[in-house]
Amino acid sequence: MNKPAETMYVIPNRYRKMENLHIVFWLLKDISWCMGWKILGITMIIPTLFVAIVIAWRTRQFKSELAHNLAIAFWISANSLWMISEFFAFDTKPILFGFEGKHLALIPFIIGIGILTWYYIFVRPKEVEENHAVTM
């Protein structure tokens, strides 16, 4: 019995270049956070988040890629909120019910994990089932 050919996911070179630039932005943002460079760190939120959203938009036809890229965009949002809370010293300030400023980052973190949970529980099983039916 022959094994069916594996489906290839190919990224156009211009998209790959954008993804690589995205990593540079992300690293600059996080290095700035580590070093306490407020202006650069906050400024780098814009290109880092913008490129993450563009990547998610460009991969929207692939449900798996869209889910993971949206989770990354929410991760960057959460990470940025956390960074801002530290830069402006409200990270350890009580907000409500024992939550502190840095815990605002839980909102986008939870949204991101919610998107991935939805994908793996509801969408992925259907994709596997459809692919199995096609290869039979």
Image (cartoon, grey):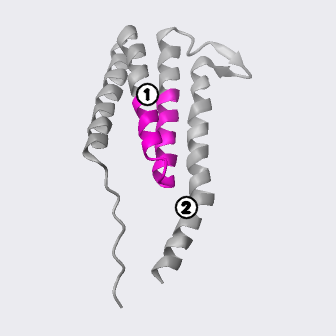
Residue named by callout 1: 50
Residue named by callout 2: 124
Is-magenta flag for residue 130?
no
Q: Which mark is on residue 3?
A: none
Magenta portion: prevailing SS class: helix
Query: Which residue does the image show at 56% across and 72% down from the upper left?
Result: 129
Name the residue at the bottom extreme.
Answer: 1
Disc 1, SS: helix
Is-magenta flag for residue 69?
yes
Left or right of 8 in this view: 115: right
Left or right of 123 in this view: 40: left
> Sequence-wise, which precedes: disc 1 or disc 2?
1
In space, the residues marked 1 and 2 are separated at their CA atoms by: 27 Å
Q: Is residue 76 above or below residue 41?
A: below
Q: Which residues are magenta?
A: 49-78
Of residues 103 and 132, the one drawn nearer to the viewer in this rendering: 132
Q: Hey, what amino acid is under mark 1?
A: Phe
Disc 2, SS: helix
